[in-house]
Amino acid sequence: MAKVAQFEKGKTVVFGPEGFARVEGIGEREMLGKRVTVVDLFVLDSKMNVTVPLERAVERGLRPVVSKAAAERSLTRLADDRSEPLPWNRDGRLLKDRFAEGDLDGMVDVLASLVDTQEERKLNDGQRALLDKVRKAYVREVGEALRLSEEKTEARIDAAIAERTGA
């Protein structure tokens, strides 16, 4: 079971495939005859308030934003890691599934794969849309972890990609 202390009111968290959310509150409620801990979230991308039992939210990928050290490691990995890119099959399912896992490593894997593909050939519409979505999520998480503005975070990511591509 997740520790309630991980999800303080006002903190930004990652809420699985829904993206980033702000914790609006944590409390106890009676649901179906049982007392459960619930978390009230404001999902930033959809601008929607949701109340979810904490246990269920964690199952759906609720987690704190990564640490500063993890964000720095991810930037280094984006710049230096030369793993085999994830293949883009007909509907991009492998890349989409990896991104949907909701962790920072998955974001780096997908971002690196799409950047590498873009170096070889023009991306199709689905690849470009996924690249934009992953980059937006990566910028938000790295920026939050490093306490940087969006512009400074973009610059750090652009520098890592330039190092990766030799540009």
Image (tube, rainbow, N blue to C red):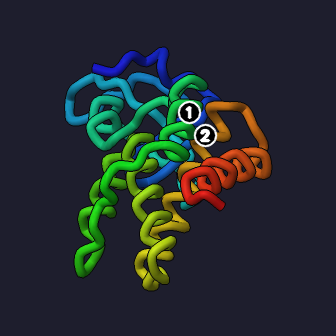
- Viewer can see residue 24: no
Circle 1 packing at 10 Å, graded few (<14), some (14-19), many (20+), is many
> Which SS class for mark 2?
helix
Three-letter code, disc 2:
Val
- Viewer can see residue 74: yes
Q: Residue at x 54, y 61 (%)?
A: 46
Three-letter code, disc 1:
Ala
Residue 119 location (% of width, % of height): 50, 71
Indicate the quadrant containing the C terminus: top left, top right, bottom left or bottom right: bottom right
Left or right: 150, with 23 as reference point: right
> Residue 71 — which label?
1
Are the residues tagged 1 and 2 within 8 Å (C-beta)? yes
Q: Mark 2 = which residue?
A: 142
- Outermost residue, left side: 33
Query: Looking at the image, is 29 positioned above or below residue 127?
Result: above
Residue 109 location (% of width, % of height): 39, 51
Indicate the quadrant containing the N terminus: top left, top right, bottom left or bottom right: top left
The Cα–Cα distance between marks 1 and 2, rounded to whole angstroms, is 5 Å
Q: Residue at x 48, y 51 (%)?
A: 19
Query: Looking at the image, is 118 positioned above or below residue 143?
Result: below
> Which SS class for mark 1?
helix
